[in-house]
Every structure is written in C-alpha cells, then in structure tokens.
Image (tube, rainbow, N blue to C red):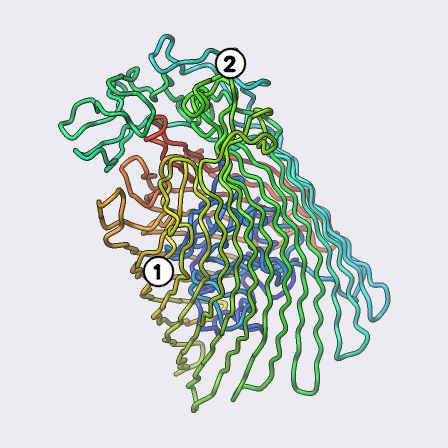
Amino acid sequence: MVASGSAWAQTGSSDNDASASSTDIVVTAQRREQSSQDVGIAIAAFSGDALTKMGLSKSSDIAQLTPGVFVSGSIGGQTQQFTVRGVTQSDFSDAVEAPVAVYIDDVYVSTQQGQTLALFDIDRVEILKGPQGTLFGRNATGGLVHTVIAKPNTDALGGFVNLSYARFNEVKAEGALNVPLSSTAAFRVSGYYNRIDNYWKNRYPEGVVTGAPQNFAGPDDRPQPCCQNEGGGKTYAGRAQLLLEPSDDLKIRLSASGARQHLSTGPYTSVATIGTYDDQGRLIQSDRVSPTETRIAIGPDGGNYTFPVDGTGLSGATRAPGATWFGYVPLDPKNLELSSDFARSDLNRVSVWTASAHVDYTLGSVDIASITAYQRHKKQLLMDADGGATNVFAFGARADTKIFSQELRASGGDAGFRWTTGAYFLDIKADAIQALLGPSGSFLSLLVVGDASQGIDIVPHTNLHTQSFSVFGQTEVGLADKWTLILGGRVIREHQEDELSRNIYLNTDDYGIDTDTLLFPYGAPYSDRRTSTLWAAKAQLEYRPVEKLLIYAGINRGVKGGSYNAPGIGSNVTTDQLSYKPEVLLNYEGGFKYGDRFFSLNASGFYYDYKDYQAFRFANASGFVQNVDSKVYGFELDAGVQIFEGLRATAGASYTHGTIKNFEIAPDVFRTVRPTYSPRTQVSASLNYEVPGDVAGGRLSFNAQGNYASGFYHNIRNFNSDWFKGRTLANLSMNWRQEPTGLSLTAYINNVTDKRYGMIGFNNVANCGCSDESYGMPRTYGMTIGYRF
C-alpha cells in the first residue's frame, strides 16, 4: 500500500474491483468528489472491497497499509488510537479527545472504544495527514480517519452476504440489503457478526518461583473464577438507513446504528524489568532483566538499590533470578502463552449507539449540507495490570460518553472560484473512570490498607463536559492559468467544565469497579471551568504546469483544545498540573502528485513546529499529560505502476523524525526524547495480479502485501525497556469472483511468518519490576464466501 493517493480505493462503490486500479481514486477530502491526484493533501484511501479481499475488518487494520500511520491504545488493544506522522497522545482516558479525529459516516467519534469497531458495509476509508480545521467538523492537529459507509440508492434491489471462517475458530458474517421503496425513497439495512476463540493460552501458575521472597500469596488467594484464556470475543453490529428524495434539490438520509462487544479481560503479558536510580532516588532508566538478575533495582553505584522503591518496602530485598519483584518469570509469548491470575474469557463489555440525520439541499448554485448526530458510548474493560501470575494489582476502565454534534455547511463556485463555509457545534458529556484495582489477597491492598485480605479500588472519577462551537471556511481561487490559491480558517469557542474525585473504595467484586463503600479519599476534590478561543488556518499554493502533474506548498495551522488529567494514587501530580493547555501545530508542507491509472508517483515533505504538544507520561501505574514543545519533520513517497494488463505494483515509504527537547523524565532530570508509537521508518509494498480470461467461469486475482515499521517507544520517557523492535509483516490473499452470478471466494493469510511483535506497552518497573506488553495478531488464515445480488 502507499502513503498518499493509495491505489486501493476506487470510485464510490463498494463493489468495485479494487485490484484493477482502472480508474482514478475518488475521495471527498475537500468536501466534494475529486480524484486524489488532484488534491494537494497527503491522502491514503482504501475501498471496503479491497479490505474484505485481504481479510481485514477492523478500522485499526488500515495502519498496516499506509506508512506514516500507526496505532496505540490500551487494555491489550481493546481500545486504540491512531498516530499520524508522530502526532499522538497515549492517554487512555475516554474523557480525552485524540489529536487524530475519527469520523464514521461524517460523524465525529471522540472516544477510543468507538474507533475500534468493525468496518462493515463500507464504501471506503480515507486518511488525511496533517492538521485539519478548515473543512471538517472537529478541528484536529494530527489528521483524520474517515470511514465512508455504503448508502441506500433508488436504482435497484440489491445486497450482499459474506461468510468467513478463519483460524482460532473465527466466524464472521456480514451482509446488506438495499430496497428501493419508490423512485424517491430507499432503505438499506446491514449487519455484522464476529466471534473468535481466546487464542492466548493461560498456563497459570507456570512461571511462579516457589518460595520467592515477594511471592506473598498462594493460588487460593486469587480472584475466582481464576486464570482463564484471553484474546477472544464477540461483536454484534447493525445499521439501518432511510433515504428520501422529495425533489431533485433535496435529499434526506436518516441513519441508526449500534454495536456491542463481549471481550475477555485485556490480554497482556509481563516482562521482568529493572530500574536504575540516581543518588537522589530518582528513576532515570529501566531495562529488561537478564535470566540471572537478582537485584531489585540498580543504585548509583551499580549495586542493589538499598532505599525503598516507590513505597513498596522492598529495601534490601532481592528478586528470584530473571523474575519480577514478586517471583514471576514471564513465559515466552512466541507460543501465545501467558500466566495470569486475573484473567476471564468473557468479561469486558463495550456498546455504541448512533442516530444521525444527513440533509443535502441545493439552493440555486449553492449546496447546503446538514449533519445532526447523537451518540452514546459505554464500556467497562478490565485487565491484569502486572500481567503475571502473582496477585499484585489490576486495572479497570469504565465510561459513559454522550455526544451531540451539529454541522452545517454551504458551498458553491466553479473552477475559477470555489468556496465552502460552515458552522459546527459539539457537546460531549464524558463520565470516565480509570481505576487501579486491588483484588482480595493483592499486594496493592496490603500496601495501601495493610490488609491483603481486604480488597480495595483506587478510583479517579472524571466528569468532563465539553462544548465547542466553531465557524470555518475555505476558498480556492484560480490566480492565473495553472495556478490556484487555497485559503482557509476556523475560529473555535470552547467551554469545558471538569469535576474530579479521587477516592479509595471497598472492593466487593474482584472483577468489577466498586464505588459503593468509600474508605477514604487519596486526593482533594477538584473542579474547574474555562472558556477559550482558538483558531486554525491554511494557506496553500498549487501549480499544474502540465497535465497529470500537481505541485503544492503551503502552511497549515492546526489546534486542539486543552483538557484535564485524572491521576491515580502515587502520581505526584500537583493541582496546577490537573489542567493542561491547547496544543498548536504549524505545518510547513510541500509535495507533488504525478500520474494516472497506469503510473503514479507522489511525494510530500513536511516540517512540524509543535507548540504545547500534549505529551502523556506514564509512571507509577498512572499517567498525566503535560505541555511541551516538539519538532517533527519527514517525508512520504508512494508509487504505483501498471506493469502490464492485470499486474499492478505499488510501493510507499515514510520517514518521520520527531524530537522533544528538555523533557522531564524524572524530577529535574531532562532529556531529548522521541514521541511514542512513532516508527521513524515505514515501508509498504503490494503486488496484485489478475489472471487473464476466465478461470472456472470467473475472474481470479492474487495479492501479496508487505509492510515494515522500524522500532518505537511506548513510553515518552524513552527508557530501554520501553522499546519495541521493528517488524516486517507479509499478507497473502486470493480472490475469485463470478460477476454474472455474484458469487465470490476469498482465501487469505495475514502475518504469514507468524511474527510476534509488540504493539502496546506500559512501564511498571517502579511498581512490580515489570512492564505490560500486548502484541499484534498472530498468523491468521481463512476463507470468505460471498454472494452479491
């Protein structure tokens, strides 16, 4: 796949043959249909049909397909966020918006769990890189990911059904039915079902070192039921749409959708780590331990650290060789095995419900669009926070988020002068908890209340109400033959009201978050309200010297509003650090796009001057966001060539160099660090071949796709143990389609070499002498039978 102007998307119909690349890519990056080769923005786009052929069904899967885009998250990947060109924020609170805006059917989705649901019955996915503020509803500094769904039409009765079976007994079913009700009305209903076995095998109590000094509790003290397999789940999703066209000038589309997920506890594994402390007791480094390591921590003289380590009372102790502090030697994840005392095969829950109204009206030469939407996102997700077989602590997240948005746009003009203007209102009510759980018999309960038999829940509880109103606009002015000037801007008025409580509650359910019986607060209640005025702007010059060539250069100012922290116990966050400021990204970018359906070559280079970047630092089983300045520069390159009829090759590469100078990794200890979840180098390539003529009465095609991402840090302190090595993945697929009958057959293998690669991590070296890590999907293979009518 490629970084900008991907050859995988086709003209607005999900039943296009995405491998043929027989037409220019049509996108709506500038709020009208255009060939991507005619848009001066770094774009990646993928048709729903292409994703189905490759066996990809989650929005996060597209991060494999385009350089410059990556994924982070939490709960073993059960919540995820996009990183674009090194712009990310790893805060996993559902009260916090990400710098990369995600849209589904033109509706902005502010929460993490709403971004991980299945891609079903879609037309295409578009990724726009760089600040967005002059055309789309919600302003964003990093870019946006837009899932464009398949819509009702009055042309004919039609639909499709896809049934899949894959490794780990994965079953997928997807279908849609389009019903014309009259010449001016149509109805479309679509559904999706997916279930997969728990493929991480729990070998508890393997790895526990009998008699280790910190193995303080026995197997009978674990939360019951105990120690089940993880990684599986079920997803149910559906959507219904009604299209009404009362006149040639008016189109109304009503949509209602919902999805539910039943998941295991978050599948994390543990890695034994060791911290290095300076002569003032500050943690300045952490490393993965060797099989013979027995020190609890490394002191300034290189010996066993002899002072209490972050209040654990382990002064002077030693660890079992190669183990965590609590006597657990982690299992090797290559065998898809873990050993966890806090693991349930079916516990976590997520639900998303959305209703929207899309109205398009033509008033003379002016096109008017209105999008009204209401969403509700609910979740409760839990995981073993130490990732091992000893009962240290767990983590839970619970959220109930209600989102209302109203967007109103008007546009008009022609090739000499085009304009778009609009207003956007957003109301988010987020009720969010990120709790550290001490189940009965846990070390956390022993440490905090002095009684391991008494479970506790440490609960920072946030109620954040955000209201944002903005007006925006963009014009395209033909200055002279072959030259175009683009100017745009946005003004945002944002109001926030935050309430934070920090309490410790009696634990009555080891597998839940309890807030009924208050034991005592661990921090004073906090409340704040503020209103700020923000602005974004864009100025770009485009030149088309010859046919098929676009050269562009411009300046783009993006902005993202500030928010609030909700730190856990032991985070040492002061009251003035509970709020943080908006971030501003000034992007200087230039590039060119050349080519057509036979050959294309696109390139862009960028420099980000990033002020008050909202950097998330995780430490002491908690995290907080602070404002720092950052610089990012890089380039992206992609090419596509039709080698001969039926054979097409694409390739893409990106280089992203981000640095944050003078970042405080410990009190009064400053270093230059890299942004998290941002590989500096990414490369992808694909080869698609369609066999000439019919094979068994249908068309047969083959696809090979590979991608490489260099190493990256999962924690902004950039400690050695926070580093994930680079990885290369390969996917293969075959598709047979018989157009007259609508039958199709797809076979695929993803992650052919069964690479075990780190995706998400949390540094807990100061809490358990360990880190939590989750991994990308192992090798999967399956078949899909489809029928389209």
- What residue is shown at x 80% (from left), y 78% (from top)? 247
> Which residue is more in the foreground, 137 or 394?
394
Mark number, residue 146: none
> Which residue is more in the foreground, 752 or 150?
150
Check disc 1 and give the amino acid type: Asp
> Which residue is more in the foreground, 292 or 405?
405
Where's residue 358, x and y in %? 70, 67
Mark number, residue 612: 1
Q: Earlier along the polypeptide chain: callout 2 or callout 1?
A: 2
Where's residue 166, x and y in %? 60, 34
For the residue labelled by badge 2, is the local secondary structure a helix, a strand or a loop?
Answer: helix
Badge 2: how crowded within 10 Å, few (<14), some, or many (20+)? Answer: some
Q: Is residue 210 left or right of residue 52?
A: left
Query: Vertically, is 283 above or below 411?
Result: above
Q: Which residue ends up furthest to the left in the rendered image?
A: 301
Q: In this view, does 561 lie to the left or right of 344?
A: left
- What residue is shown at x 50% (from left), y 29% (from top)? 437
Where's residue 82, x and y in %? 47, 52
Q: Quadrant of residue 356?
A: bottom right
Q: Name the residue under label 2.
A: 221
- What residue is shown at x 57% (from left), y 24% (from top)? 510
CA distance for labels 2 and 1: 46 Å
Q: In this view, does 112 lie to the left or right of 351?
A: left
Query: Vertically, is 624 above or below 21?
Result: above
* Residue 379 appears in the rendering: yes
> Which residue is more in the foreground, 602 or 332?
332
For the residue labelled by badge 1, is the local secondary structure a helix, a strand or a loop?
Answer: strand
Check disc 2 and give the amino acid type: Asp
* Residue 789 appears in the rendering: no
Badge 1: how crowded within 10 Å, few (<14), some, or many (20+)? Answer: some
**Dot 2 and dot 1 residues touching (CB under 8 Å):** no
Q: How many numbered marks appear?
A: 2
